[in-house]
Amino acid sequence: MGLLANKTALITGASRGIGLAIARRFAAEGACVVLCASRWGAHGNLPGTLEQAVQLIQDAGGSAAGIACDLSQAEARADLVQQAASHFGPVDIIVNNAAASKMRLPSETTTRDRSWMFDVNVNAPIDLAQQALPGMRESGSGWILNISSSTALQPVVPYRDSQVAAHIICAYGATKAALDRYTQGLAHEVAGAGIYVNTLAPENIVLTAGADYVRDIARRSPDMAEPVEVMAEAALELCSGQHVGRVTYSRRFLHSLGLPVKSLDGRSVLGDAFLPADLEATA
């Protein structure tokens, strides 16, 4: 019996990357996972599909289902939690991992781009939380984890990368700052009902399959990348423990609790919060 036995988890942005890693880690702990992504089938030149992600978890002995949904469309996400519940029962855990970004200077980011980012990065997580809250209140328990970003804070000077790199992330970071603030308010509203709401961000850039640009950065500055297992382990703790309104970061959160980092299948301990990214890994 794993930490998440008899739990149903809905994870957005789960066809690859951080979302898929969290889904795999949760499934290894006994959760039935519903993976949501923007579409079935190939997505541009990015590796992995929703079908492949579901199959990967099922092949490992886990229970998984997939839902294609464009979270930028309010009507498309209006009954997403209900759709997820139709697979394995009421949703106990939501991980709002899906995110959208447009990299432009803050003086040039258009209203359309800002609205699109706020819809995916702020409105969608809030909508899904509101959909799930009645059922969580009825059951007396629930977990909502919003994946945030260090870009919610203005980078310190001197910038680790170029000035342009620091500036073009501004609008995206503003959406994550809004998500952090809303998370804290919601967390303190619903904590008395046994519902735990938090945000989690990577310390730096997460190394995932196909993220060649992260490998390039990590080869120059190894401390700027972290293994995806660190995020998955921190997410597991935040979706099983009793944490209220945390706006926290992967490595420092695990380090503060003295927790080990395990493989995504949960079978082995890889290290601790200081676990370096494996630049040669491809999975």
Image: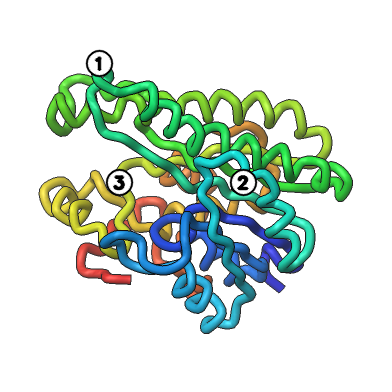
Q: Identify the residue at image location x=50%, y=73%.
A: 265
Question: Mark 1 highlights which residue?
Answer: 107
Reply above or below: 187 against 65. Answer: above
Instruction: Answer few, some or many: residues within 10 Å of disc 1's Cα (few below 14, many 20 plus, some between 14 and 19).
Output: few
Amino acid type at circle 2 is Arg
Pinpoint residue 138: horizontal percent, then vertical percent.
Answer: 88, 46
Pinpoint residue 223: horizontal percent, then vertical percent.
Answer: 23, 46
Question: Mark 2 highlights which residue?
Answer: 77
Q: Identify the residue at image location x=54%, y=54%.
A: 69
On screen, residue 244 versus residue 55, left or right, reads: right
First in sequence: mark 1 vs mark 3: 1
Amino acid type at circle 1 is Ser
Front-most of 41 and 178? 41
Toward which corner of the image does residue 5 lie, by quadrant?
A: bottom right
User: Is residue 260 visible in the rendered structure shown here?
Assistant: no
SS class of the residue under badge 2?
helix
SS class of the residue under badge 1?
loop
Tag of residue 205: 3
> Can you say which quadrant of the picture contains the N terminus?
bottom right
